[in-house]
């Protein structure tokens, strides 16, 4: 399978490297010093699972790559306006496009760019960072991808979702295909939008909020707001999504920072609109109150504006 990874940064580059090592043909879409380093020295991954260098195709222009079998979209959502118009250059008659972006609006945005029929919705759990051009550091060993259909009936796992999960599993990724790709995306948003909002607004890591009695209670209240919006959307997320989230946070190292907090501290753009903003807007559309998330969203908008 020929796979193009659009956004070969910390997440996309990591999965692209794994897929290339497993024997798939991979084309990384990157730019700048990162692209030059990949072309000159290969893509280096440092990981508790083992360090390796992968020689892989890389380009800044999807038109030079041409149609592929699978596109994995892994850019930050704030880059969509520049990136999505380029995706048709990678699409042939049978091309599938899988989004691993944060937030719940990515599949719709992709459908506008390449058509609903091509789109799979997915989410990932992995901790990686670019620490130098051409060098990705993985912390921890999680490398999980959950994917499924974004549109249509979504009553059973589709053949194409199952095939892609199998290919990812062959690259030593913990991959799972599900019938409804919206479910894992929204379940992650319950946690991520809340975690990013509190750590970003407080400018503190997870433990400063979760280990404080008032902070923990407020965190859970806001997570329930996101859960209520998901249910108003008609997405059948798990009944115990909050309980599972709390267990995850109990085990999370207290110094863990959200990517939104890291971006704020580094003066970079953030995904506030794709996370907190999307919850607030969809809540209003469904008449679901989101007072906690709205306050956090307002604070983060002021911080990034």
Image (cartoon, helix red, strand yellow):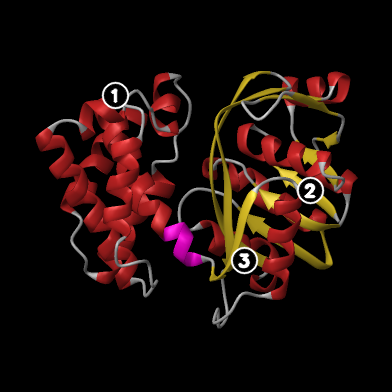
SS assignment for the magenta stretch, majority: helix
**Which residue does the image show at 74% across and 45% down from the upper left?**
5
Q: Nearer the viewer, mark 3 or mark 1?
A: 1
Left or right: residue 12 compared with residue 214 = right
Q: Identify the mark nearer the N-term, 2 or 3.
A: 2
Between the C-alphas of marks 1 and 2, the distance is: 35 Å
Q: Secondary structure at mark 1?
A: loop
Where residue 244 appears, as percent x and y from the top left, is 32, 53
**Relative height, residue 32 to residue 152 (above, below):** above
Around disc 3, counting alpha carbons within 10 Å, would you say few (fewer than 14), some (14 to 19), or many (20 or more)? some
Q: Is residue 184 magenta?
A: yes
The verdict on residue 85 being magenta is no
Residue 116 at x, y percent in the picture: 64, 71
Q: Which residue is mark 3?
A: 111
Q: Is residue 8 visible?
A: no
Q: Of the numbered discs in the image, which one, if any, rests on residue 4?
A: 2
| Earlier sequence position, callout 1 versus callout 2 | 2
SS label for mark 3 = helix
Instruction: Give the magenta range.
Output: 182-186
Location of residue 120 in the rendering, given as x and y in whole percent from the top left corner: 63, 64
Name, please, the residue furthest toward the left: 214
Quadrant that contains the C terminus: top left
Q: Position of residue 169 (x, y in %)?
A: 70, 53
**Mark identifier at residue 17:** none
Mark sitting on residue 203: 1
- Precedes in sequence: disc 3 or disc 1: 3
């Amino acid at each position: 399978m020929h796979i193009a990874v659009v956004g070969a940064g910390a997440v996309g580059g990591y999965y692209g490297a794994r897929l290339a090592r497993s024997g798939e043909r991979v084309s990384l879409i990157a730019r700048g010093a990162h692209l030059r380093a990949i072309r000159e020295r290969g893509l280096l991954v440092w990981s508790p699972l083992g360090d390796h260098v992968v020689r892989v195709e890389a380009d800044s222009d999807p038109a030079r790559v041409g149609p592929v079998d699978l596109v994995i979209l892994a850019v930050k959502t704030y880059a969509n306006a520049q990136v999505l118009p380029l995706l048709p250059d990678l699409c042939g008659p049978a091309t599938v496009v899988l989004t691993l972006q944060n937030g719940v609006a990515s599949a719709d945005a992709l459908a506008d760019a390449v058509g609903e029929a091509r789109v799979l919705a997915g989410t990932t759990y992995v901790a990686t960072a670019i620490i130098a051009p051409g060098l990705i550091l993985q912390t921890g060993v999680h490398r999980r991808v959950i994917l499924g259909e974004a549109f249509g009936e979504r009553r059973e796992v589709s053949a194409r979702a199952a095939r892609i999960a199998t290919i990812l599993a062959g690259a030593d990724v913990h991959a799972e295909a599900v019938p409804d790709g919206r479910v894992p995306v929204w379940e992650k948003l319950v946690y991520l939008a809340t975690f990013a909002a509190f750590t970003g607004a407080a400018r503190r890591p997870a433990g400063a909020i979760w280990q404080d009695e008032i902070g923990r209670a407020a965190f859970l209240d806001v997570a329930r707001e996101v859960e209520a919006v998901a249910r108003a959307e008609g997405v059948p997320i798990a009944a115990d999504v909050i309980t599972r989230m709390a267990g995850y946070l109990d085990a999370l190292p207290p110094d863990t920072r959200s990517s939104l907090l890291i971006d704020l501290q580094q003066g970079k753009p953030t995904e506030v609109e794709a996370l907190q903003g999307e919850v607030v807007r969809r809540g209003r559309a469904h008449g679901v109150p989101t007072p906690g998330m709205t306050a956090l969203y307002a604070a983060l908008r002021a911080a990034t504006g």
